[in-house]
């Protein structure tokens, strides 16, 4: 992976700064750039200084920049937008990210461009819905709308990675597993929502469905979403197991987030305010996964137990 990509990843994604370097070099750079592009979209979605109209305008600029057959100026995109220094630095380098994407193999470039277009289109749709309802974005009412939101911001990433990995492996049959790759993406997004629910509430953001007075409590909603997250991650394990045993690094890239998600859910179930997992658990899970990665039966069993028992399984 190029130094430019690695440095920005280290700033904006602790998780994928660990995972992407595990991939073969020929795949790590395209996937790294894909995550930087999705983080640019995510920053435009969440940046507190932007109005809905400004978000739409910047999405339009990014759409044109990605769709044009020739390089176009990054315009208003390349300015310090975001909630922290790393996001602002990435946004200022948006033009360079787009230039590097343009130099990728067509199959990789098409997959990540399609993902970004779907993500932006979905966010714009939810911005419109939020305005119509007079409620803060994304104005989620129920479980179905929560899944819809998670699809737009994470499920499409599962589709993209499925396409990129199928191309890298020269294994088109993997595309038949796109639906479970989507489930994996949705599950990981649900984990993030549950992990950050209290912090988001303090900042005036809400991604969990609204509790209806007298019908269901916030605690019941939290538990229901936690159960849905586990089910999505369990379905996502089928994508990991569909990857060839010889592609151990791709299995690690897709499987370790399931392990970390399961650990996070176990902690969130005990204490929603302390769901973040430790570096020692991350290291232990990496070592455990490496021992099991080539054994489908053992890996399936470990995933199943981990999704039910959390950190107790890591220590075995």
Image (tube, helix red, strand yellow):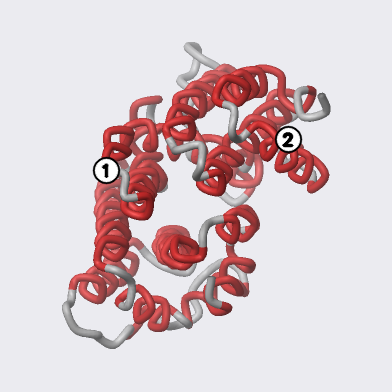
Q: Which mark is residue 88?
A: none
Mark sitting earlier along the chain (2/1): 1
| 262 relative to 170 in the view: left or right | right
Residue beneath label 1, please? 172
Q: Secondary structure at mark 2?
A: helix
Q: Decide: few, some or many residues near mark 2? Use Cα within 10 Å; few <14, some 14-19, many ≥20.
A: some
Question: Marks 2 and 1, Cα distance to the nearest angstrom?
Answer: 30 Å
Q: Quadrant of residue 292?
A: top right
Q: Quadrant of the C terminus?
A: top right
Q: Decide: few, some or many residues near mark 1? Use Cα within 10 Å; few <14, some 14-19, many ≥20.
A: few
Residue 65 position in % (x across, y down): 25, 76
Residue 30 appears in the figure: yes
Vertical relation: 141 (above or below) 100: above
Residue 96 position in % (x across, y down): 41, 83
Picture residue at 49% right of the left edge, 40% below the top: 189
Vertical relation: 211 (above or below) 28: above
Residue 47 appears in the figure: no
Residue 279 position in % (x across, y down): 79, 48
Picture residue at 31% right of the left edge, 71% below the top: 58
Q: Secondary structure at mark 1?
A: helix
| 147 relative to 268 in the view: left or right | left
Residue 255 position in % (x across, y down): 56, 38
Seen from this angle, which residue lies furthest left?
A: 69
Vertical relation: 228 (above or below) 187: above
Q: Quadrant of residue 159?
A: top left
Picture residue at 39% right of the left edge, 26% below the top: 142
Discs 2, 1 touching: Cβ within 8 Å: no
Seen from this angle, which residue lies furthest front?
A: 246
Residue beneath label 2, please? 288
| 228 relative to 306 in the view: left or right | left
Viewer-closest of 158 and 139: 158
């Amino acid at each position: 992976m190029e130094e430019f990509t690695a440095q920005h990843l280290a700033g904006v994604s602790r998780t994928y700064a660990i995972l992407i370097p595990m991939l073969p070099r020929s795949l790590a750079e395209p996937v790294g750039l894909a995550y930087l592009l999705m983080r640019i979209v995510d920053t435009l979605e969440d940046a507190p200084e932007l109005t809905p109209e400004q978000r739409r305008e910047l999405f339009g600029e990014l759409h044109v920049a990605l769709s044009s057959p020739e390089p176009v100026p990054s315009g208003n995109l390349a300015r310090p937008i975001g909630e922290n220094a790393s996001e602002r630095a990435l946004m200022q380098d948006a033009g360079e990210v787009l230039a590097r994407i343009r130099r990728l193999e067509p199959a990789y470039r098409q997959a990540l461009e399609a993902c970004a277009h779907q993500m932006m289109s979905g966010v714009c749709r939810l911005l419109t819905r939020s305005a119509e309802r007079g409620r803060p974005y994304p104005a989620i009412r129920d479980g179905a709308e929560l899944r819809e939101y998670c699809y737009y911001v994470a499920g499409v990433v599962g589709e993209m990675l499925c396409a990129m990995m199928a191309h890298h492996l020269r294994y088109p049959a993997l595309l038949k597993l796109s639906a479970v790759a989507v489930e994996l993406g949705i599950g990981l997004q649900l984990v993030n929502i549950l992990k950050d629910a209290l912090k988001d509430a303090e900042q005036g953001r809400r991604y969990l469905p609204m509790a209806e007075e007298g019908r269901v409590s916030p605690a019941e909603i939290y538990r229901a979403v936690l159960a849905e997250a586990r089910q999505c991650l369990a379905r996502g394990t089928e994508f990991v197991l569909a990857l060839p045993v010889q592609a151990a690094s791709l299995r690690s890239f897709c499987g370790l987030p399931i392990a970390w998600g399961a650990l996070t859910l176990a902690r969130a179930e005990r204490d929603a305010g302390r769901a973040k997992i430790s570096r020692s658990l991350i290291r232990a899970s990496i070592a455990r996964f490496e021992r099991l990665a080539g054994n489908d039966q053992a890996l399936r069993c470990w995933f199943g137990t981990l999704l039910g028992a959390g950190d107790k399984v890591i220590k075995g």
